[in-house]
Image (cartoon, rainbow, N blue to C red):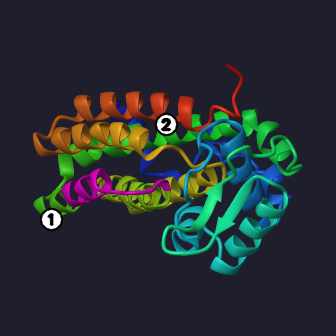
Amino acid sequence: MSGTVTRMAALGDSPAGLAAPALTGIRRLSALDTVRARIALAVDLGLLTPGERLPTNAEIARALGVGEITVRRALVSLCDDGVLVRRRGRTGGTLVAERPTRGRVREMAVYTESASEVRDLIDHRLALECGLVHLAALRRDDKRLDELRRLVGWMDKATSWAEFHELDARFHLAAAEASGLEAAARRYGEVMNDLYRYYLPYPVEFLRECNREHAELVDAFDVRDPAAAVDVTCRHVEVLHRTMFVGLQPG
């Protein structure tokens, strides 16, 4: 591990084996199409269930890294496609249709054909994150530890996948920055941003279960246990991405 960690410090000259893969498939899509594809695929996979209310446009925009106007246009088009419905009134909003149309959104194909890109990104993330949390456990300070604990608490109270996703992204970047390796943490953030292009909405109950591993990681930092930090990171990445990207990877 120590040799790996040392090499992390020189990520500006990282070897080709750790170079981020080209995401040509996803980048062929417009921002509008990526929102359509991710929400429609989540409905097809049962991650968003009939009658489920979607978060606000602003929350979805932040979670998926697009503008609110793009989200609004995407949701309207998915209503036209029969995937979603729009209801007015205090209890209204945008909901998954009771009998949603499935397989109609052609943009989903770009995601379902991207298994190799996703696997490469997951491997890249894991290689970086293990080294970063190893050092973070040794170098963390109380201020950073308090920040991570607050984020864990907020994720426990998150009421939607969009809210959780935004906090999750902040947590992992803060954990990486606790290593003190600015260049490595910055590179890690770039990899995570590429991986988040494939992010699908997921039931918030499942996400809260994953948050237990976030808490375990903070505990490992608290007692300065790098082995425990790496162990929980390996488990977290393996389990989370085996389920989060179920529609993209072969079983």
Q: Secondary structure at mark 1?
A: helix
Which kind of residue does numbered mark 1 sit on?
Lys
Magenta span dominant secondary structure = helix
| Residue beneath the point at 27% across and 59% down | 154
For residue 10, above or below residue 124: below
* Residue 81 or residue 166, whichever sits in front: 81
Q: Quadrant of the N terminus?
A: top left
The residue sitting at the top extreme is: 251
* Magenta span: 148-161
Q: Position of residue 21 (x, y in %)?
A: 71, 46
Residue 143, numbered label: 1
| Residue beneath the point at 75% across and 46% down | 100
Q: Which residue is mark 2?
A: 127
- Which one is earlier in the sequence, the residue at label 2 or at label 1? 2
Left or right: 128 with respect to 154? right
Q: Position of residue 146 (x, y in %)?
A: 15, 60
- Say few, some or many: other residues with alpha carbon within 10 Å of mark 2 (under 14 / 14 to 19 / 20 or more): some
Q: Is 182 included in the stretch rendered in magenta?
A: no
Q: Quadrant of the C terminus?
A: top right
Residue 22, numbered label: none
| Residue beneath the point at 67% across and 36% down | 45
Which kind of residue does numbered mark 2 sit on?
Ala
Gap in angstroms between the C-alphas marked 2 and 1 = 26 Å
| Residue beneath the point at 68% across and 71% down | 71
Left or right: 30 with respect to 62? right
* Residue 74 or residue 96, whichever sits in front: 96
Q: Position of residue 134 (x, y in %)?
A: 29, 39
The residue sitting at the bottom extreme is: 69
Q: Secondary structure at mark 2?
A: helix
- Say few, some or many: other residues with alpha carbon within 10 Å of mark 1 (under 14 / 14 to 19 / 20 or more): few
